[in-house]
Image (cartoon, rainbow, N blue to C red):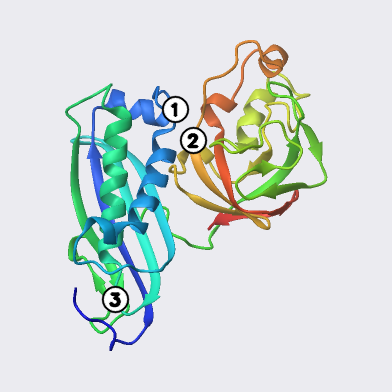
Amino acid sequence: MVDVSAKERTQRAARAGGFVAMAPATLELVRTGGCKKGDVLAVAQVAGIMAAKRCWELVPMCHPIQLTGVDVRFELVCEPGRCGVAVEAECRCCGETGVEMEALTAASVAGLTIYDMLKAAQRDMVIDEVRLLEKTGGKSGHFVRADDSNEPQISQADDALLATVVAVSLSTKKGTRKVPQDAIELVAGSGVVGDAHAGNWHRQVSLLPEESVDRMRQKLPELAAGDFAENILTRGVELKELPVGTVLKVGEAELVVTQIGKTCHNDCEIRRLTGSCVMPTDGVFAVVTRGGTVRPGDQISRG
């Protein structure tokens, strides 16, 4: 390995991208959570993070690096001539050498994991476009890939206000309406304290836009917060348009979107109450990455 002991320790970061091309029907399995192996993007995200941490064991001349942060984000793309999952990995450290290889490894392994999760549905998927997008820090300075410099980043952090929390609710039993609360407490890696859906899984917190409930209120004006079993009722953003992997600041807490919509329970109380349910089509699910209190009136912004 190259001796870097004389180099100055600086803050360094790198972003890498990739793309897994697939048929629209396969992409729909990702979007709806229909893959039999589980949540495709949640598993791929963890795989990418783990790969970044072990890059030095895979690439012979890489230094072991103490990473200070790893993010893996996704965007579902389906347009003429291009259909699949875009991957973006970002790594950060304070050290003598950069983290470009860690970011590239994370993007590559996330793509491989997406393939593995979906190969039973389609075996001719293509993992493509693995490339360095940007790096900062070190003697060579700031690099931005020329053909990506004007393209929007996937779920990049910005503090733009997205929405407002209208109500917060919880329930002690799955498949039932939730009861509005003055506040809910979120715990990292678990979910809402006292809620039946809390636990070590990918759907710890549910969010639903009040705009969707308003459409249902045209038939049933008495519908209230929590009737669709959502933990957080929002106003101001079409939640289902947010890519999986989007980081959200909600009050004091931070969430990562893991799933858009879900399969509805045909015999659940919500469906019996309303005759239909907007959660499967318009709701999103997330895991808690930073705990804290969430109250009505709190702002929601990108993390």
Q: Which part of the image, by quadrant, shows the N terminus?
A: bottom left
Give the left or right position of residue 279, taking residue 103 as reference.
Answer: right
Amino acid identity at mark 2: Gln
**Which badge, 2 or 3, is on the more N-terminal residue?**
3
Marker disc for residue 33: 1
Marker disc for residue 220: none
The residue shown at (27%, 77%) is: 142
Front-most of residues 295 and 111: 111
The residue shown at (57%, 56%) is: 301
Give the left or right position of residue 18, taking residue 240 as reference.
Answer: left
Count of marks placed on residues: 3
Q: Quadrant of residue 20?
A: top left
Q: Position of residue 24 (x, y in %)?
A: 28, 27
Amino acid identity at mark 3: Thr
Q: Nearer the viewer, mark 2 or mark 3?
A: 3
Q: Which residue is mark 3?
A: 97
Q: Are circles 1 and 2 on residues that touch, CB within 8 Å? A: yes
Q: Position of residue 86 (x, y in %)?
A: 30, 45
Identify the secondary structure beneath mark 3.
loop
The residue shown at (41%, 59%) is: 70
- Category of crowding for the residue at label 3, using alpha-carbon neighbours closer than 10 angstroms: few (below 14), some (14–19), many (at least 20): many
Q: Which residue is mark 2?
A: 259
Q: Position of residue 25 (x, y in %)?
A: 30, 23
Identify the secondary structure beneath mark 2.
strand
Residue 244 in the image: above or below residue 123: below
**Which badge, 1 or 3, is on the more N-terminal residue?**
1
Amino acid identity at mark 1: Gly
